[in-house]
Amino acid sequence: MTRRTCKQLRIGHVTIGGDAPIVVQSMTKTDTRDVTATINQIKELEDCGCEIVRVAVPDNETAKSLASIKKSVSLPIIADIHFDYRLALAALQAGVDGLRLNPGNIGDREQIAIVVAAAKEKEVPVRIGVNAGSLPVNFQPNMPLAERMVNMALEQIKFMESLDFDLIKVSLKAFDVLTTIQVYQMIADKIPYPLHLGITEAGLPRTGAIRSAVGIGILLHQGIGDTIRVSLSAHPCEEVLVAYEILKSLGLRQRGPILVSCPSCGRAEVDIIALAEAVSKRLQKISKPIKVAVMGCVVNGPGEAKDADVGIACGRGKGAIFRKGEVVNTTSEDSYLEAIMAEINRIA
Ligand code: SF4
C-alpha cells in the first residue's frame, strides 16, 4: 500500500495527513445544547479510542454551549455547520478546533469568505464536506453525480485558495459505496489536501459496518484517506470500534486485541459462539494489541490459529490453552472463560 501524499494539518493536538496515522473520528448524537450529556458522550468516545469528535451546531443556543463543552474535554472538536455562516463564526469564537462546512447549503460566497477569514486568523482547518444528497439542484444538473460532487469540491477549494487559505480537508460522501469510491479516486490526485473518508448514512450496525468496510477499506488499500468516520445508526462508540477493525484488518493501526474465533462446525463440543462473545466482551477492557483465538476443537484449533498469541481449543469436557499454536495448559469445560482470560491477562 503506497499512501497518497498530501499536506499535513492539525486539528487541535491531532495531526492529519502526510505520514500521520489514519485518524478515527466520530460524531456526538446528543443534543449539543445539553452540555452535560454532550461532555459525557465525548468522554465515552475518548475512552473507546475516538481521536476527533464532531458536534452538530444547528442554532445559536448550540453555538453558545460549545465554549463550555470545549473547556471540559480534551478531544479536538469540529463544529458541523449547515446553512448559517454566523454559526461557524460563533463556533470559532467558542474555540473549536475545526469546522465542517457543507458548501451545498452555504451558497453565498461573501459569507464563506467571512468564515474563511475568521478560520485563517485562528488557524483553524475547514473541512469542505460535499454530500451527494445535498448538492444544489442547479449545480451542473446535466453532469453525472460523481463529476458534480468532485467539481463542487474543486470549486470550493479554488475559492478558498483564492482567499490564501490552505488549511483544508475534503470529504465527498455518498450512501452508494461505488459512487463514494469513484469520487475519492477522481479527486485524490487533483488536490494536495487530506481526505476524510466515510460512507454517509451507512445504516444499522451490521449492514453499515459492512458497507463502510468495503468502501473505506478499498480506498485505504489504494492509499487514499487520512481520517475516517463510520456512520452507523448506533451509539457512536460502535462507530469507533468498527473504524478500528477496518484499520486493524489492513494493518494500518493497532488498538486493542484482535479476536480470532472459529465459525464452529459439527466437530465443536461446546457453544463456541457464546464463548467467543463472552471473551470478546472481556477483551474490550484490554488495550494491548494481542491476538486471541477461541477455537471449537482440539484437533484443528491450535493449528488453525497458530499465529494467535494465546487461545483456547475446546474439546469434550476439557479444553487446551495454547500460545502461538503450542498447548501450554488444559482446563475443564466449566472454567473455559476464566482460564483463557487468566492467560490473556498474564500477557496483557
Ligand atoms: Fe470446526 Fe474445529 Fe475448525 Fe472450529 S476449529 S470450525 S470446531 S474444525
Image (cartoon, rainbow, N blue to C red):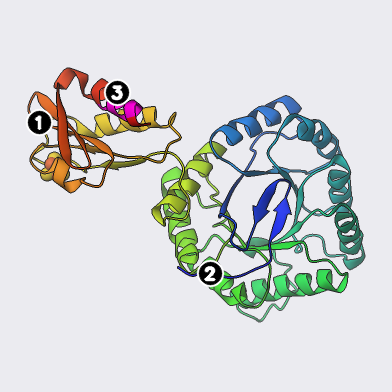
Secondary element under disc 1, as helix, strand or loop, is loop
Near mark 3 (Cα within 10 A), the count class, few <14, some 14-19 or many ≥20, is few
Q: Nearer the viewer, mark 1 or mark 2?
A: 1
Residue designated by label 1: 315
**Marks 1/3: CA–CA distance:** 19 Å
Residue designated by label 2: 179
Q: Which mark is residue 284?
A: none
Q: Where does residue 146 sit, x and y in percent of width and height?
A: 60, 74
Mark 1 within 8 Å of ligand 1, using the beta carbon: no
What's the magenta region? 340-346
Near mark 2 (Cα within 10 A), the count class, few <14, some 14-19 or many ≥20, is some
Residue designated by label 3: 342
Q: Residue at x 38, y 39 (%)?
A: 257
- Outermost residue on the bottom side: it is 142
- Outermost residue on the top side: it is 334
Q: Earlier in the sequence, mark 3 or mark 2?
A: 2
Q: Amino acid at mark 2?
A: Thr
Query: Which residue is nearer to you in this view: 70 or 252?
Result: 252
Near mark 1 (Cα within 10 A), the count class, few <14, some 14-19 or many ≥20, is many
Residue 269 is one of the magenta-drawn residues: no
Q: Amino acid at mark 1?
A: Gly
